[in-house]
Image (cartoon, rainbow, N blue to C red):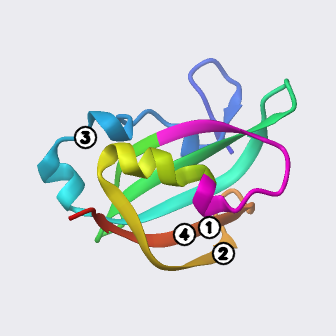
């Protein structure tokens, strides 16, 4: 975790980036991966997922936070509508590893929807 300006710890994947729907076509054309970070509890029983779209160099381009009920729903089904709005789709399979915060994260390749 990283300290925030008010002294509280924040997760590095919560930093400010534009929402996916706000990205222009040139930026979206650079998108190569989507990372879905481990969820946070919302306080009302749902899980809050953070997804980050990155370019080929690994630089974050945009971020989306979304809520989903806490029951076994395939990750692809949870994030697909948010990628659709941005005109992106997952290609290939998902891989899972530990992020900088030592929590699982899931990553897949993306490309603009033709």
75 within the magenta span: yes
Q: Residues within 10 Å of mark 4 (few under 14, many from 20)?
A: some
Which residue in the protein does label 2 denote? 96
Whether residues under marks 4 and 3 lie with C-beta atoms below 8 angstroms apart, the answer is: no
N-terminal-most mark, 2 or 4: 2
> Residue 24: image x %, image y %?
17, 41
Between residue 93 and residue 106, name the one nearer to us: 93
In the picture provided, is 81 more to the left or to the right than 1?
A: left
Q: Is residue 73 above or below residue 8?
A: below
Whether residues under marks 1 and 3 lie with C-beta atoms below 8 angstroms apart, the answer is: no
Q: Residues within 10 Å of mark 3 (few under 14, many from 20)?
A: some
Which residue in the protein does label 1 denote? 106
Q: Residue at x 46, y 45 (%)?
A: 82
N-terminal-most mark, 4 or 3: 3
N-terminal-most mark, 1 or 3: 3
Q: Residues within 10 Å of mark 1 (few under 14, many from 20)?
A: some
Quadrant where the image shows the N terminus? top right
Q: Residue at x 38, y 50 (%)?
A: 84
> Residue 96: image x %, image y %?
66, 75
Magenta part of the protein: which range? 64-77
Between residue 55 and residue 15, name the one nearer to us: 55
Which residue in the protein does label 4 denote? 107
Quadrant where the image shows the C terminus? bottom left
Alpha carbon separation for disc pair 4 and 3: 20 Å
Alpha carbon separation for disc pair 2 and 3: 26 Å
Which residue in the protein does label 3 denote? 23
20 within the magenta span: no
Q: Residue at x 63, y 17 (%)?
A: 6
Q: Secondary structure at mark 4?
A: strand
Whether residues under marks 2 and 4 lie with C-beta atoms below 8 angstroms apart, the answer is: yes
> Residue 47: image x %, image y %?
76, 40
> Which quadrant of the structure image shows residue 73?
bottom right
């Amino acid at each position: 975790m990283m300290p925030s300006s008010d002294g509280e710890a924040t997760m590095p994947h919560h930093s400010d980036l534009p929402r996916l729907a706000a990205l222009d076509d040139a930026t979206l054309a650079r998108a190569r991966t989507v990372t879905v970070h481990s969820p946070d509890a919302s306080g009302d029983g749902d899980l809050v997922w953070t997804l980050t779209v990155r370019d080929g160099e690994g630089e974050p381009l945009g971020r989306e936070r979304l809520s989903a009920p806490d029951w076994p729903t395939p990750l692809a089904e949870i994030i697909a509508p948010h990628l659709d709005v941005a005109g992106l789709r997952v290609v290939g399979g998902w891989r899972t590893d530990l992020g900088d915060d030592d929590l699982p994260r899931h990553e897949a390749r993306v490309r603009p929807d033709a």
